[in-house]
Amino acid sequence: MVAEPKIENDNASVELLERARSALGTVCDPEIPVLTIEDLGVLRDVSITENECVHVVITPTYSGCPAMNTISMDIETALNKVGIDKVKVELVLSPAWTTDWMSEEGRQKLLEYGIAPPAKGGTTASLFGKPEIACPQCGSKNTEKLAEFGSTACKALYRCKACLEPFDYFKCL
Amino acid sequence: MLAANVDETLEIDREALFQLALRLGDTSLILGHRLSEWAGHAPILDEDIALSNLGLDLIGQARSFLTYAGEVEGRGRDEDQLAYMRNAPEYRNLLMVELPRGDFAFTMVRQFLFSAFQLPFYQQMMQSRDKTLAAIAAKAEKEMAYHLRHSSQWVVRLGDGTKESHERTQNALNSLWTYTGEMFETDASLKALIEAGIYCDPASIRETWNKSVDDVLQQATLTRPETGWMQSGALTGRHSEHLSHLLAEMQSVQRAYPGLKW
Ligand SMILES: [Zn+2]
């Protein structure tokens, strides 16, 4: 697949790109609606290709992430709303998504939403260690894992032994 | 499409690459389907959710492999046509994954034996000279680490559990053992792909697999079965009768209404 040449140097294209970027900043993850796809690091690239077409590149969190179709449709809808009709959404697998791509702002939003953000440095080897997960309600690190798989594939279920609240932990990948 | 993904200097046998993509995709798809059968039947709710999530990862991986298989084949077949419109002899999955789900011990032992291979296998495949296969492997590798951890913990818990759970787990291990040889099998086409740097030599994974298996079996107080005669059939499409039954259910809607979309 040969990439079409990017045209970003004229004023109209710069304006179009700005408009597209700001519209894409409103597209949220359907399963964790406090995070935008930008916060998550799912949005990889936005560019203008020939004929003023907006080319959006996204990557899945998990291979089987069921939200990708919805995200693609939401991207088209968000762009249509600001008058952009020529849209191409491309799904790429490489480089593989990692929770380290989640923005600082995104991690903060997750915490406020009641989901413990992922431990940093998500390598395969680190999965076999035991990360200290702080309770998003009271901040205590005295927590225990209840279930490896929670409400979605990307979350595990924990319980805080200090305030006794159960909570979701966004697993590192 | 092919030229962009594979180093152009390589002389690739398109049919061999197609068969490889099917082998990887079909194995993930069929095991994913077997796991999905647990929805609503697992011993506890947490496990019901866990097994569905493992299945979802595998079906996601299968979609990528089968989409690529369709591109390599170049006859316009997409992932759905390959999954829903082929008959059992055209499937290239490992025989191990088509066996009925059995009891919970059987499901977990199978998941463990398979994941202990798949994790180092995908780690090797990340270096494949086929960029698409390398990208799918890089994505799947992290997922398999979770599968291996989860299934290892269960094998230990069941093996080193009650008399009943120990017996069932040992029986599962004994009956699955003859199906483990297939993961390491190669034929002339696969050997050519190994030569070309596209497929990884499964013999190079043997030591890592042995070590993972021995470690967990020891903790689980289970006895490693003697290695003797091994089942074989994936490479030629010679399957057990279980695959046809599985496909009859999995494909029923597309067979009745070809091309139907949600
Ligand atoms: Zn707390």
Image: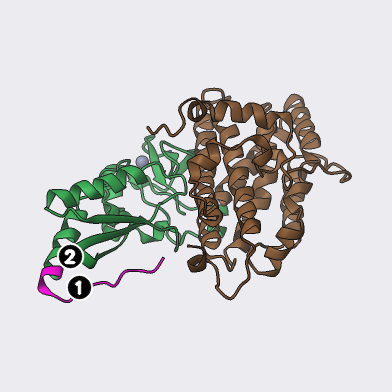
Chain colours: A green, B brown
Q: Secondary structure at mark 1?
A: loop
Nearest the viewer among B23 and B152 is B23
Image quarter where ligand 1 lies: top left
Identified at 73% across, 48% down, the residue is B235
Q: Is residue A10 magenta?
A: yes
- Image coords of residue A120 (percent x, y): 42, 60
Classify residue A134 as left or right of residue B100.
Answer: left
Range of residues picked out in magenta: A1-13
- Does B19 appear above or below B230? below
- Image coords of residue A117 (percent x, y): 36, 51
Identified at 76% across, 37% down, the residue is B176
Q: Quadrant of residue B10?
A: bottom right
Q: Residues within 10 Å of mark 2 (few under 14, many from 20)?
A: many
Residue A8 shows which numbered tag? 1
Question: Nearer the N terminus, badge 2 or badge 1?
Answer: 1
Asked whether disc 2 touches disc 1, contact meaning CB atoms under 8 Å apart, the reply is yes
Q: Quadrant of residue B231?
A: top right
Nearest the viewer among A159 and A142 is A159
- Image coords of residue B46 (percent x, y): 51, 31
Q: Residues within 10 Å of mark 1 (few under 14, many from 20)?
A: some
Residue A148 shows in this picture = no
Q: Amino acid at mark 2?
A: Leu
The residue wearing badge 2 is: A17
Q: Secondary structure at mark 2?
A: helix
Rounded to the nearest angstrom, the CA distance separating label 2 from label 1 is: 8 Å
Classify residue A60 as left or right of residue B95.
Answer: left
Viewport quadrant of the N terminus of chain A: bottom left
**Residue at mark 1: chain:** A
